[in-house]
Image (cartoon, rainbow, N blue to C red):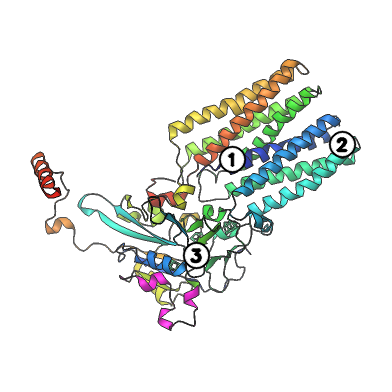
Amino acid sequence: MTSLPAFPSGRRLGLVIDLDICVGCHACAVHCKEWNTGGHPAPLTDRDAYGTDPVGVWLNRIHTFEADEGDDVRTIHFPKSCLHCENAECVTVCPTGASYKREQDGVVLVNEDWCIGCKLCSWACPYGAREYDETEGVMKKCTLCIDRIYNENMPEVDRVPACVLTCPAGARHFGDLGDPRSAVSRLVAARGGHDLMPELGYKPTNKYLPPRPRKTRARDIGAPRRLVPAGNAERLLAKWMDRIFTR
Amino acid sequence: MHPAYSVIFFTTTSGAGYGLLILLGFLSAADALPPHFGLGLAAFGLALGLVTFGLLSSTFHLGHPERAWRAMSQWRSSWLSREGVFAVLVYPAVGLFALGWLVFGRNYGPWAVAGLLAAGLSMLTVICTAMIYFSLKTIHQWHNIWTPPAYATLSVMSGGVLLNALVEIFGLSNPYIAGWVAASIAVAWIAKLFYWRFIDDTEALSTPETATGLRVYGKLRAVEGPHTVDNYLNREMGYHVARRHAADLRRVVHLSAFALPLALTMVSLLFGNSGAAIAATLVAALAASLGLVCERWLFFAEAKHTVNLYYGAEAA
Ligand code: SF4
Ligand code: SF4
Ligand code: SF4
C-alpha cells in the first residue's frame, strides 16, 4: 500500500549522524554493503567489480565537502543513506504498492517481489537514497537494517544497524526520534541537529549534527593564511628529485 | 535527467495517439467530421497503433515488465498508477466509438457520447502523465505550473496535424477542422513558451547549503565523491546539457514543432482539397513529429534533480 500510514504509531526509528566526528573512513558504507548483500534486500549486485568501470548498488554513501576559504577552510565528511522521511513521496509515487512505510516504526522499505523497476521512486527522492539494481531489475534502499534491529537471534548489543555498530569514530547513532526523551532526541536537541532540504517538506526522520565551532583558528597558531604555489627554483628542484627517485 | 529513448518515444507517440482520439471525439460530437469509413479506419488504426506502441515501449524500460499489471493498484496515491488505469479504460470506450463509426456508419447521436467518453479518458491519461512530472518537487523545471498545460496541448496538436493530413488525403478537407488544428498548434506554442519562461526566470529552492544544512560554514565545494566511477544516480539523474546547446535545440523546436506546422496548416486552411494541401499537411505532420521528439528530449535534458547538489552541482 503506497499511501502513507493513516495512523502512524509515533515511533520514528532513524539515525543521527554527527558531522563533527565523522572522519570519512567509509567503514559504515562497507559494512552496510556486506550485511545487506546477504540480508533483507539481498543481493546488492555489482558489475565489472574488478574492472575499469565498476558500478554497483550501495545503500550508504559518503561525500566530502570543503566549506569556506583560506585558513578558515574546513573539510566535512558527509554520510548519506535513506532518511526514512515522514512525508516520504518516494512511497506515494509508487504505482505497485512495492514501496511502503511501516506503521509501527516509520521504516521505509521495498517489497522486491512486487517492484516493477519503474525507477519513479528514485526520481521522487531528493537525497539520492534509492539505487536501482540493474541485474535484479528492482529498486534497493537502506532498510534501517530491519533484519538486525528486531533480530532475536542476536545478542541485544548487536541489535543496531550495521553502519552504527561499525563506525570506529562513533559518529552514527540509532534510536526513536519520535520519543522526545530518547537518547537520540536529546542529542539532537543538545547539538542543534538539523534536517536536509527542509524546504521540500519531506520531513526526514534522520538528523545531522553540525560540526562544532572551532576553538582555535589556524592563523592563531602560526599557519599561513593562504598556501602559496611553489616558485620556479623549488619546482626545478622537485622535478630533479623526482627524476632521481623514480629511476 | 537522462533522456531515455523509451520514455521519449512513449510520451510522444502515445501523446499523438491520444490527441488524435481527443479530436475525433470532439469534432464528431460537434458534427464537423463525416463518419467516412476510410477516414475512420485510418484514424482509429493510426491512433490505437500509436497509443499501443507507446505503452509497449514504456514497459520496455521496466525491470520487470511481467509484473506491469501491479502498476494499476495504487491509484489512490500514485499518478503513474492512475495513468495506467485510464490508459486501459480508453480501449473499451474507443472500441464502442469505432463500432458506431465503422460498423453502423454513425458518429453522431448516442455514438457521439462514446466518442466524447473516449476523448475525455484520453485527455485524463495525458494529464496523468504530465502530473507524474509536475508532482516531483525534486525537479524544479518540472514542478512548474506549465507542465500539465504544455503536455495536454502538445498532445492535442500532435494528434491534430495527423488528423488534418488524413482529412486531406481522403478529400474531406474542411476549414473548420484545419482551423481547430491551427488553433491547437498556436495554444501549444504559447504553453511551451510559458514553460520555458518559468525555467529561465525562476530558481530552485534547494542549494548545496540546504542539501547539507551547512550554510553557516560558508560556500560549499564537493571535493570528493563517494565513488570513483559514475553510479546509477549519476547515470540516471546527472545528465547535463550545455546552455548554448539547449538554446540551439529550442530554436529547432520553435521552427519544426510549431512555426512550420502552423504555416503549413494555414495552407490547408486556405487551399483545402488540393494536391498542395495534401503535401503541406504531410510535411506538417512530419515536421511536428520530429520537432516534438526534440522537445521531449529537451524536457528531460533541461531537468535538474536535487541529488546533483551532493555531487558538486551549484544549483538544481
Ligand atoms: S530519504 Fe528518500 S528514499 Fe528515504 S524515505 Fe526519504 S524520500 Fe524516501
Ligand atoms: S521502482 Fe519499484 S518501488 Fe520504485 S516506484 Fe517503481 S515499482 Fe515502486
Ligand atoms: S541502517 Fe543498515 S541499511 Fe541503512 S545505511 Fe545503515 S547499514 Fe546500511
Identified by mark 3, the residue type is Pro
Find disc 3 in the rendering and name its residue.
Answer: A43
Q: Position of residue A204 (x, y in %)?
A: 48, 63
Give the secondary structure at mark 2. helix
Q: How many marks?
A: 3
Structural distance between the alpha carbons of marks 3 and 1: 31 Å
- Nearest to viewer (mark 3 / mark 1): 3
Residue shown at 73% from the left, 43% from the top: B122
Q: Amino acid at mark 1?
A: Ile
* Residue B102 badge: 2
Highlighted magenta segment, given as a residue range:
A147-169
Are the residues under marks 3 and 1 on the same chain? no
Element assignment for label 1: helix
Question: Is residue B229 magenta-colored?
Answer: no
Is A211 or B79 nearer to us in this picture? B79
* Residue with the mark numbered 1: B8
Tell me the tag on residue A68. none
Task: Say few, some or many: other residues with alpha carbon within 10 Å of mark 2 (under 14 / 14 to 19 / 20 or more).
Answer: some
Determine crowd level at label 1: few under 14, some 14-19, many 20+ residues with C-alpha closer than 10 A. many
Find residue B202 and report its horizontal and vertical position in percent: 48, 41
Horizontal relation, residue B83 to residue A70: left or right = right
